[in-house]
Image (cartoon, rainbow, N blue to C red):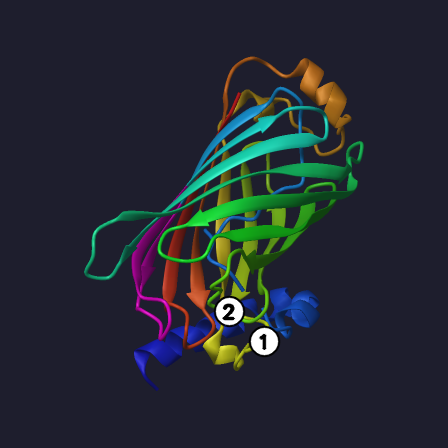
């Protein structure tokens, strides 16, 4: 067995049980370029977020030939339900320099805002100006269910190209999934999975698509973590009213294993979020 095949087999065995609830999603033809970050449905009026989501790749896949990629994101809560989003993407293909590839602007609307535990739902739409390719429009729901210290979040996004010269015949699709358990005020562990298919009209086989998954460590360095209690979750409105002016810093790091021939063998991901 080759080293590359061994890595894929290890990833599939390690994550198979955790991904079983998503079997119906993962068996669909699935797409679009993105960083490996699971978006949350929460929107808070007056809250500003600056985020960096980075990835370093090892063992190039048949379709994915990257050294590193980054996403810089700005978000601002305009109302209790409406959020402004601006994002920029950078990529470094193997043998080339780091370059800007895409800028996006749009928003998110939170449809369901639970008080504490329960189901949260939002919808996101972005216009994407893409370098050397047709512009795109991304849209889709973000859903989360939380009970106590445990939560699961799923993003399902569709992407359509704009203009007279599209390079695909249908929509792209991508999913981001997270299963998370909070150990204490500051530390949480989880599993995340990401996948995409470039064209619904020509999905190809599973090995032609990009799929990866792996463990992630989450750290919360903010004052919000000091006040956290799994047994005492107040409404988001109350939490916002009591929130300190001090910035909140959250970070995450993980290792994602490629589950298909098209995907890089291993992806090292890291996230940094500053809220104020």
| Helix, strand or loop under label 1 | loop
Q: Give the range drawn in magenta.
A: 54-71
The residue that disc 1 covers is 201
Residue plotted at (47% across, 39% down): 87
Residue plotted at (70% across, 66% down): 21
Measured as percent of width and height from the top left, residue 90 is found at 34, 47
Mark found first going from the N terminus, 1 or 2: 2
Q: Nearer the viewer, residue 95 or 260?
A: 95
Measured as percent of width and height from the top left, residue 134 is found at 45, 57
Residue 59 lies in the magenta-colored region: yes
Q: Nearer the viewer, residue 217 or 32?
A: 32
Measured as percent of width and height from the top left, residue 219 is found at 49, 37
The residue that disc 2 covers is 168
Task: State the CA–CA distance, disc 1 to disc 2.
Answer: 8 Å
Relative placement, left or right, of 135 versus 106 is left
Q: Which of 182 and 132 is in front in this view?
A: 132
| Helix, strand or loop under label 2 | loop
244 in relation to 155, above or below: above
Measured as percent of width and height from the top left, residue 53 is found at 43, 43
Residue 80 lies in the magenta-colored region: no
Relative placement, left or right, of 56 versus 163 is left
Neighbour tally class for label 2: few under 14, some 14-19, many 20 plus, Cα within 10 Å: some
Q: Are marks 1 and 2 in contact (CB under 8 Å)?
A: yes
Residue plotted at (52% across, 28% down): 49
Question: What is the residue that sits farthest to the bottom in this orientation?
Answer: 1
């Amino acid at each position: 067995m080759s080293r590359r095949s061994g890595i894929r087999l290890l990833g599939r065995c390690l994550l198979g049980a955790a991904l079983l609830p998503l079997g119906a999603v993962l068996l669909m033809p699935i797409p679009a370029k993105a960083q490996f970050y699971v978006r949350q449905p929460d929107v808070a009026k007056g809250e500003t977020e600056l985020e960096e989501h980075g990835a370093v790749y090892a063992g190039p896949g048949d379709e994915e030939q990257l050294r590193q990629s980054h996403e810089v994101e700005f978000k601002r809560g305009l109302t209790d339900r409406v959020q402004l989003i601006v994002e920029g993407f950078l990529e470094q293909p193997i043998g080339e320099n780091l370059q800007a590839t895409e800028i996006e602007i749009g928003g998110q609307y939170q449809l369901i805002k639970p008080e504490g535990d329960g189901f949260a739902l939002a919808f996101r739409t972005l216009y994407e100006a893409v370098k050397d390719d047709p512009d795109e429009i991304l849209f889709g729901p973000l859903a989360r269910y939380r009970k106590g210290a445990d939560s699961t979040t799923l993003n399902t996004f569709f992407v359509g190209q704009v203009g007279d010269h599209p390079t695909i015949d249908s929509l792209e699709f991508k999913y981001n999934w997270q299963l998370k358990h909070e150990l204490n005020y500051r530390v949480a562990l989880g599993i995340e999975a990401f996948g995409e298919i470039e064209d619904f009209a020509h999905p190809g086989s599973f090995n032609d698509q990009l799929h990866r998954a792996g463990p992630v460590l989450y750290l919360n360095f903010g004052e919000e973590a000091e006040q956290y209690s799994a047994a005492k979750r107040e409404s988001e409105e109350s939490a916002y009213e009591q929130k300190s002016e001090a910035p909140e810093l959250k970070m995450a790091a993980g290792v994602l294993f490629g589950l298909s021939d098209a995907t890089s063998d291993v992806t090292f991901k890291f996230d940094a979020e500053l809220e104020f």
